[in-house]
Amino acid sequence: MNVSLFSQSLAVIFFGLIVGITVYLCSKIDLKLRLKVLALMVFSALVLSIILVYLTAWLTQSGNELPNNLWLMAFPFSFSLFILPAILLAHRYIKKHTPPKKSRKKIVEEHVTKTAYLVAFSSLNVILGLAFMLLAVNGYYHYYPTLNTVFNIGTPRTLVLSGENKVVLQYSTNESSANKSSIESAIYNNDPTTSKGKLYGLDIPGKVSKFKTRGGWLYVPSIAFNSTSLVKLPVLVMLPGSPGIADNMMFGAGLNTALSQLAATHHGITPLVYVADDNGSTFNDTECVNSSKGNVETYLTVDVPNYIKSHFNVSDNPANWAIGGISMGGTCAVMLTLANPNVYHYFVDLGGEQGPTFNAGSPEITTKILFNGSVNEYNLHQPIYLLAKNKYKGMGGFFGNGTGDILSVTSGIALLYNTTKNDGFDVVHETVNGDHTFNTWSKLVKESLPWISNRIGATECTETVVCQ
């Protein structure tokens, strides 16, 4: 069950089966009609594929975030739907225009048998076509990494703080300020550890917010287990997009790998990182605010920080706390930092919008659904409004997007970067080649992690040009 759904070999196997069965079924169409019938089937499948794309865009209200080649992903499925009707109609046409050479009883028996196995093979091809489409779309979004996550069973997660098997982090009270001093420079010794940290499953309950979440992930740096180094680590909270789960951020966007690489070059030091669930369910677009979708802002600014501070010996200084994410998670990070500067001083916005927007809808729709029609509440969760209204000190963030990202992202990030920069924030904006996909976010996670780790006081800057 722990089969990787991102495997190209799996996609090739599915596609090979679809092609093989399709060729076999199409061979059952009479030779005289084959070219005409196939041409009609291809045309019909293309039309249906395009209809499916537009229907998906309409239902999800996120057409600008759909794969550009979604129609091509859907084509095998669309084509498979027309094979059986085409075969049966062709057989009926031939039967009607060809005198019978066998007895009626024999013809009926052969027709029943032939129809049975044609239906069976055609049904199998439809299932394979649908599976291939879902596999291709899943590969684009990196939503479900394995079959375990699809069925929510057997997920390989070692739970932290379960029973008596507790992880205790030992740190001193060393304070650090962004870019001037860090834990790394303070505790470096002649025998530093360079091993990667440990990953645990940690589901922080919504004690105050009552928000019901799915599984989260906690990354504990190896420096936490070095008894000679007693320091309070900074904290980085990371968020997936919508639709999304914590696995998308940790594995799809490569955060786990990036953390291990950072630890390997910084004596086992990284921030303590918690990947939280900001959705609660698959298609629950919360935008990280308190609404009928769940009290997510309270969860991320009260429940999560309080739990981490009470269970782990980490810094309680907001200057050592950051929140970040991809897509909607990036939008949330900027908004939550500006709206709650007493909790977070830094953010990481990778592919986020200008502000909370419900299912890519208009401000009016967002205000109605997420803020119960309150324009004032809507404004108080829009970063541009907050920047104009409030004065901030000692704040900063990392903005990142792809060159081919969607317009609402590129324009929103450019506006937020320029505004925060003019307001004296410690900010950087990096653009990499790519679209609104996990390939782009993986690059940006790798680029942003050394920067944010330095700014919240964990490590020195050495990896990237942007970390200066």
Image (tube, grey):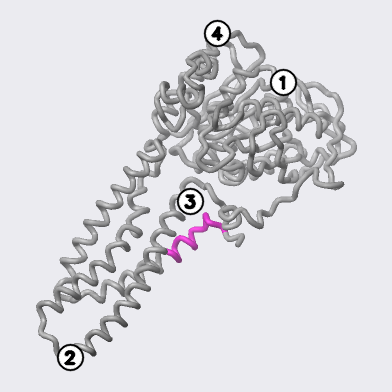
Looking at the rendered structure, which numbered label has been put on residue 102? Answer: 2
**Quadrant of image for the N terminus:** bottom right
Contact (Cβ within 8 Å) of mark 1 with mark 2: no
How dense is the environment of label 1, judged by Cα within 10 Å: few (below 14), some, or many (20 and up)?
Answer: many
Pick whichever, 249 or 30, lies toward us.
30
| C-alpha gap between disc 2 and disc 4 | 88 Å
Q: Is residue 213 left or right of residue 415?
A: right
Contact (Cβ within 8 Å) of mark 2 with mark 4: no
Q: Picture coordinates of residue 347 (x, y %)?
A: 61, 25
Q: Is-magenta flag for residue 12?
A: yes
Name which of mark 1 and mark 4 comes first in the sequence. 1
Q: Which tag is nearer the camera, tag 3 or tag 2? A: 2
Q: Secondary structure at mark 2?
A: loop
| Corner quadrant of residue 399 | top right
| C-alpha gap between disc 1 and disc 2 | 87 Å
| C-alpha gap between disc 3 and disc 4 | 42 Å
Q: Picture coordinates of residue 464 (x, y %)?
A: 60, 32
What residue type is disc 4 on? Lys
Pointer 4: what residue? 389
Contact (Cβ within 8 Å) of mark 1 with mark 3: no
Looking at the rendered structure, which numbered label has been put on residue 139? Answer: 3
Magenta-drawn segment? 4-14
Q: Is-magenta flag for residue 333?
A: no
Name which of mark 1 and mark 2 comes first in the sequence. 2
Q: Secondary structure at mark 4?
A: helix
Q: Which tag is nearer the camera, tag 3 or tag 4? A: 4
Looking at the rendered structure, which numbered label has been put on residue 318? Answer: 1
Residue under the point 31% across and 82% down: 113
Name which of mark 2 and mark 4 comes first in the sequence. 2
What residue type is disc 3 on? Gly
